[in-house]
Image (cartoon, rainbow, N blue to C red):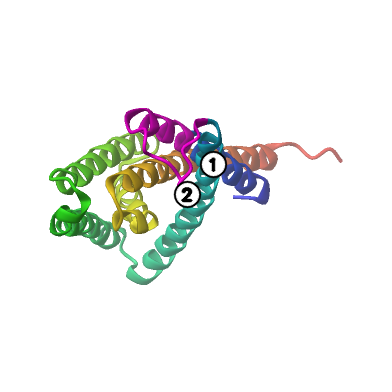
């Protein structure tokens, strides 16, 4: 991963966050006319505001993504066995889903709903499973559990502040964060594969002199 590829991933993730946040916010505003950011209800200005917030979501997602890559490198260096780290990630993912469900169930009275405590963990699990399945198909089966961990645990950590708020805040933050994380993990191997292909071609090329 060179600087040029990282720069592409960084800005493209921010764009994805901005576009997804604008779409999600527009849909939510259409469903709930009272939905707004910072108390602003004007559609045109709110759309711009939501897109700008989405850019921040993309940058925040990038920080979480590279933090996970660092954690993954350290964990593999310490544990030495890949299956141990995968087992720990799988357990942590299930624990995180159950923990979030419990927290939302306990606070369901303040959230004014009786469904988010099971809908959010279930939808997040199914969506993460789909992304992990695609990642495993595109690379190998060893990528399934790490992708699942990233899409579940890292997304929940990044969107933790919204989980202590209302359903609108959860929706507006969790969806863009999840999409940004999914985008990065699905693009990573493509960027690295291009770099490996270039290096291989360079090594096999005949010297000019």
In front here: 124 or 85? Answer: 124
Relative placement, left or right, of 172 versus 57 is left
The quarter of the displayed image where residue 32 is located: top left
Relative placement, left or right, of 122 versus 187 is left
Which disc, if any, is residue 49?
1
Q: Quadrant of the C terminus?
A: top right
In front here: 126 or 193? Answer: 126
Which disc, if any, is residue 38?
2
Q: Please tell me which residue is depicted at 33% across the width and 42% down the height of the picture.
A: 171
In the figure, 179 relative to 69: above or below? above
**Nearer-N-terminus badge (1/2):** 2
In front here: 137 or 92? Answer: 92
Q: Which label sits in the foreground, 1 or 2?
A: 2
Q: Are marks 1 and 2 in contact (CB under 8 Å)?
A: yes
Q: Please tell me which residue is depicted at 32% across the width and 47% down the height of the picture.
A: 170
Helix, strand or loop status at disc 1: helix
In the figure, 26 relative to 164: above or below? above
In front here: 84 or 200? Answer: 84
């Amino acid at each position: 991963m060179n600087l040029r590829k990282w720069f592409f991933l960084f800005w493209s993730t921010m764009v994805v966050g901005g576009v997804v946040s604008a779409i999600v916010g527009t849909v939510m505003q259409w469903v709930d006319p009272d939905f707004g950011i910072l108390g602003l209800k004007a559609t045109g200005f709110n759309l711009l505001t939501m897109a700008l917030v989405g850019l921040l979501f993309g940058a925040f997602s990038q920080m979480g993504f590279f933090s996970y890559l660092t954690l993954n490198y350290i964990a593999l260096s310490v544990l030495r066995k890949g299956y141990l780290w995968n087992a720990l990630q799988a357990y942590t993912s299930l624990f995180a889903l159950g923990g979030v469900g419990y927290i939302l169930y306990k606070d369901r009275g303040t959230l004014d709903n009786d469904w988010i405590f099971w809908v959010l963990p279930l939808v997040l699990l199914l969506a993460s499973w789909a992304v992990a399945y695609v990642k495993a198909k595109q690379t190998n089966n060893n990528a399934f559990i790490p992708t699942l961990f990233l899409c579940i645990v890292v997304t929940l950590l990044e969107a933790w502040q919204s989980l202590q708020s209302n359903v609108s805040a959860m929706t507006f933050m969790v969806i863009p964060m999840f999409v940004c994380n999914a985008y990065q993990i699905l693009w990573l191997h493509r960027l690295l594969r291009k770099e490996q292909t270039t290096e291989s071609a360079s090594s096999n090329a005949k010297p000019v002199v």
